[in-house]
Amino acid sequence: MNSAITARYSDHLVSSSASMSGAGGGSV
């Protein structure tokens, strides 16, 4: 994934980290 896209989605994933704790913590 592009770091730029991951950076943007990272902020959104943090909000839903409860459901995507793996994606939020694994991407960053």
Image (cartoon, rainbow, N blue to C red):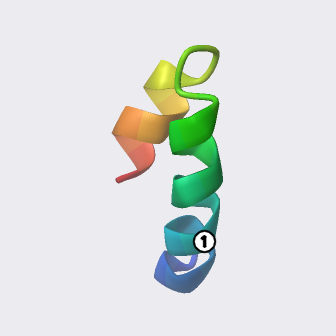
The residue lying furthest to the front in this view is 15
* Residue 14 position within the rendered picture, expressed as x and y whole percent measured from the top left: 51, 41
- Location of the N terminus (image quadrant): bottom right
Q: Identify which amino acid the numbered label 1 is placed on.
A: Arg
Q: Identify which residue, 10 or 26, lies in the foreground.
A: 10
Q: Residue at x 55, y 67 (%)?
A: 6
With respect to residue 1, does 11 lie above or below?
above
Q: Residue at x 54, y 84 (%)?
A: 4
Question: Circle 1 sits on which residue?
Answer: 8
Label 1 crowd bin: few (<14), some (14–19), many (20+), radius 10 Å: few
* Residue 20 position within the rendered picture, expressed as x and y whole percent measured from the top left: 59, 24
Classify mark 1: helix, strand or loop: helix
* Residue 16 position within the rendered picture, expressed as x and y whole percent measured from the top left: 64, 29
The residue lying furthest to the bottom in this view is 4
With respect to residue 22, does 2 lie above or below?
below
- Specify whether 10 is left or right of 25: right
Residue 28 visible from this viewpoint: yes
With respect to residue 26, does 12 lie above or below?
below
Q: Identify which residue, 13 or 4, lies in the foreground.
A: 13
Give the tally of numbered discs: 1
Q: Quadrant of residue 13?
A: top right
Residue 1 visible from this viewpoint: no
Q: Residue at x 60, y 71 (%)?
A: 8
Q: Residue at x 50, y 71 (%)?
A: 7
